[in-house]
Amino acid sequence: MRAAFYKGNRTIEIGDCPAHTPGAGQVQLRVSHCGICGTDLHLFHGNMDHRVSFPQVIGHESSAVIEAIGDEVTAYQKGDRVTVRPLDSCGQCPACKKGHSHVCQKLKFIGIDAPGAMQGLWTVPAHTLHRLPDNLPLRDAALIEPIAVACHDVRLGEVKPGEFAVVIGGGPIGALVALVAQHKGARVIVTEINPFRIKLLQQLGLEVYDPRSNDIPSLVQSETREAGADVVFEVSGAAAGAELMTKLPGVRGRVVMVAVFPKPVPVDLHKFFWREMRLIGTRVYEPQDFDEAIDLLANTPIPFRQLITGIYPLDGLEKGLIEMEQGADVMKILIDCAS
């Protein structure tokens, strides 16, 4: 079977990959599709080389069909359609013992610390699987992992019907957060500077404003009758976003940190004191977020599928990464791992 290997130095190589027979508690999957995400781009740029064993098969936004079952696996059988929650926790650290295995202190993220989904046959722990309903195409199911991120963010942000929410950054995750928050009954506005993404988000029925040509704090004050936003999601990962996020919430508003900031940036902490605001960190997802994501994708009219702007064969992965890097007219690119 073929696989896409990250070899360091901005190099992706497509080559043969031996199939690994599933051991006890494992399953072997025939991968259908895998999405490219910002984490894969960080890998491509070398920012996670300290965690990678070269050459590494990458990818974690997957849909698949079970090909083989290892010993001690009783909940699944060959032919089941599944997606993978790519977290392999230790079960023994303080975080795991408190029930927070998604932030395990020894967490292995599959697709970074262990081989990922961009291969024909992929062996993973059975406890990472979520079953797919029959009405959900495998192509679309590759969106479940990023939708689960959004479900986790919106859940921890405690979004309620009638609230006013601002999403800073309209990339794939920002778009999904906005769509899920809107589905929960909030009024949502999104800030974004990329013209292609602005147009696409507007086509999805979202209110979008370019912060370079709009005074976002004044807009929020005007639209909320000076009350301020109830919840703000920082998804841009930019210093400008961190500066903006504290200017938008009202009294006891919530700021949800979604983006990863690898380096410290200035944050106006006085605003948190003055308005009794809350800062909420979010990281990946929990099983219930995957269950919700599957339900939303399979059973609601939320236009998640319109975020797919390209589907490439396995040897198109490097092309897709470069398009994302260059800010081309893309939102979510899927890789067809069977082609």
Image: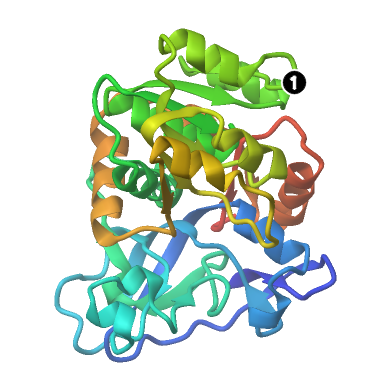
The x, y position of residue 35, in whole percent, is: 55, 50
Task: Name the residue furthest right.
Answer: 9
**Residue placed at 21% from the left, 70% from the top?**
77
**Residue placed at 31% from the left, 23% from the top?**
163
The x, y position of residue 232, in whole percent, is: 46, 34
Please state if 334 lies on the left or on the right of 155 as rendered.
Answer: right
Q: Secondary structure at mark 1?
A: loop
Please state if 175 lies on the left or on the right of 331 as rendered.
Answer: left
Please state if 233 lies on the left or on the right of 182 as rendered.
Answer: right
State the image quarter where residue 119 is shown: bottom right
**Residue placed at 62% from the left, 33% from the top?**
244
Determine whether 192 is above or below 266 in the image.
above
The x, y position of residue 95, in whole percent, is: 32, 78
The x, y position of residue 269, in whole percent, is: 55, 47
Amino acid marked by disc 1: Arg
Query: Is any part of residue 165 visible from this angle?
Result: yes
Mark 1 neighbour class, 10 Å CA radius: few under 14, some 14 to 19, many 20 or more: few
Which residue in the protein does label 1 denote? 212
Q: Nearer the viewer, residue 311 or 246?
A: 246
Please state if 226 lies on the left or on the right of 72 as rendered.
Answer: right
Q: Nearer the viewer, residue 180 or 316?
A: 180
Determine whether 301 is above or below 328 in the image.
above
State the image quarter where residue 26 is shown: bottom left
